[in-house]
Image: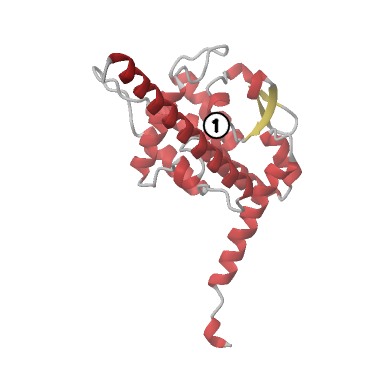
Amino acid sequence: MNENQQSTSVAVRSTDICNQNVKTLKTIKNQQDSGDVVAHLSASDVRLMCICASQTKKTAGKAKQDGERTAALIRLVFDGCLRISEALQVRMCDISETSYGWTVAILGKGSKPGLVAVNIETVNILSRYAYDYSIGKADLLFPISRSTAFRNIQAAYLKAGLRTPSVLRDRTGACHILRHSGCLARLALSGSPREVQIQLRHKSASMTLRYQKTLTAIEGLKNQQAVNVWEG
């Protein structure tokens, strides 16, 4: 095989791989659109991840993840129902107190500005983290790349003894599942799909209703576990 034939062969293989990846992603997207149950974590699992992550400290001479930063990031993504890209752009000056509670100004898809609600406990943890690490009000709270954030959050799953979610198996990634989980927690507590749609900044109500179907499925499974078919 001459050099031109080898180049053509490599190009064909690369095209085949790209086409297969696109096909896989389309399949996952279709499953997400049609599925009734959204993969998620419980609030107690997320708290455990935060605790385990915070126990990982920087050590001199080693490029080790900052545990307090990872714990604060996990909490913000979960509580605010944020995408990881949105959370990485947050500064302390974006956090504001209102007469009803606390909000965070974020930049969503396409750099579209938005507001999300967060709990006072999350605000306190972010404030303490910023103070401990001398982060200014106009500085990024999490000056790291998405890949670094992903690796650190993956490590938190392992330290907490939790299975790391994957796109192929769970139809969502290890970071984005925190957004799903926060949404389900808010929906379970508020009972208002419309309010959760606003928190998530979904254009279509049908996307948010997938979370309602998930809650219904969870409740149904709980009820069925109490049924003894042998009593009939």
Q: Is residue 133 above or below residue 203?
A: above
Question: Which of the two residues, 139 or 136, is positioned nearer the viewer here?
Answer: 139
**Percent x, y of residue 218:** 58, 59
Residue 107 appears in the picture as rendered: no
Q: Is residue 162 above or below residue 151?
A: below
Rendered image coloring scheme: secondary structure
Residue occupying the point 51% across, 37% down: 23
**Percent x, y of residue 13:** 38, 28
Using the rendered view, name the quadrant where residue 109 is placed.
top right
Query: Which residue reaches farthest bottom?
Result: 232
Horizontally, residue 224 falls left or right of residue 204, namely left
Residue occupying the point 48% across, 32% down: 19
Amino acid type, label 1: Leu
Q: Quadrant of the N terminus?
A: top left
**Percent x, y of residue 163:** 39, 47
Per the image, label 1 sits on a secondary structure element best described as helix
Question: Which of the two residues, 31 or 1, is positioned nearer the viewer here?
Answer: 1
Residue occupying the point 53% across, 47% down: 40
Residue for badge 1: 76
Residue 124 appears in the picture as rendered: yes
Q: Quadrant of the C terminus?
A: bottom right
**Percent x, y of residue 194:** 76, 43
